Amino acid sequence: MNFREFYEKLEKRFPSEFSATWDNDGVMVCTEPERQIKKCLTCLDITLPAVEYAAKNGFDVIISHHPLIFRGLKSIDTTGLCEKNERAVLLLIKSGIAAVSFHTRLDAMPGGLNDYICKLLELDNVYVCQNDEFPLMRVGKTGRTYTSDEFARHCSDVLELGKYSEACALYGDQKEIRTVALVTGSGGDYIKSAVKCGADLFVSGDVSYHETEEALLCGINVIDAGHSGTERAAAKLLKEKLDIIFNEDIYSEFFIEKRKCKYFF
């Protein structure tokens, strides 16, 4: 099938109605809409190494979670210092590789990233918190009683943080953990809703100092497992969904790049 047909099928499985109004997701780059799609690479971010890997190995399209183009590129100029995605965009165009990003729609949709991480964390009776304008947060019950430390270790193991030289930060005193609220990525804005839902613990990434202080004052513990830590699994999830949608008609592979950042010395 060509790219047009390929994307039409994706749109049915990743409905744009789940995208936040401020988001920019969907088709990022497409220079050859009639190109036949036989190989698809999935990733968290469409970085230059991801595009180089795709070009070297004959991939026709890359699907990411984070938008390749979010606020817009001001220029395409590689003669000097360049913005984050300029070189990646240029290589995609030169290689004829299409790029698609499913961002907040993948976060919010049923069976999307937040549900996927809840499943990995073995949470039961998971439901969507409706206290917010954009319903991202999931709330679920642990299969057994954890201490705060035990659930932090559980998060670290399940999200494979050590494998990528990352770690999670736990804020709060030791307490029994039975109800967990989760927002992948940067979810500090959802802490008040987590409190209203009766959560013992809030799990997210990029949680600020003031947000953690607010949570502790409200009696809820916080685990900050990092932005990439809570969303890296999007690459695997997208591949799994592609395999279901296209069966064996399209070869898919996920690409996970180890960030050049160390937490331990």
Image: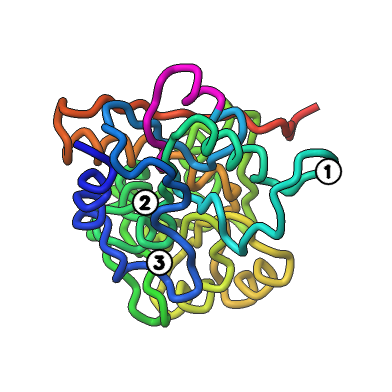
Position above or below: 265 against 176: above
Foreground label between 2 and 1: 1
Instruction: Say which quarter of the image contains residue 133.
Output: bottom left
The amino acid marked with disc number 2 is Leu
Q: Where is mark 1, residue-wise?
A: 81
Local secondary structure at mark 2: helix
Q: Which mark is residue 113?
A: 2
Q: Position of residue 58 (x, y in %)?
A: 41, 20
* Discs 2, 3 touching: Cβ within 8 Å: no
Position above or below: 244 against 17: above
Q: Position of residue 96 (x, y in %)?
A: 45, 34
Where does the magenta region start and end?
A: 52-63
Q: Where is mark 3, residue-wise?
A: 137
Q: Position of residue 25 (x, y in %)?
A: 44, 59
Which quarter shows the C terminus? top right
Local secondary structure at mark 3: loop
Query: At 43% from the left edge and 50% from the top edge, which residue is drawn?
Result: 101
The amino acid marked with disc number 3 is Met
Question: How would you rate the neighbour count of disc 2 (Cα within 10 Å): few for under 14, some for 14-19, many for 20 or more?
Answer: many
Q: Earlier in the sequence, mark 3 or mark 1?
A: 1
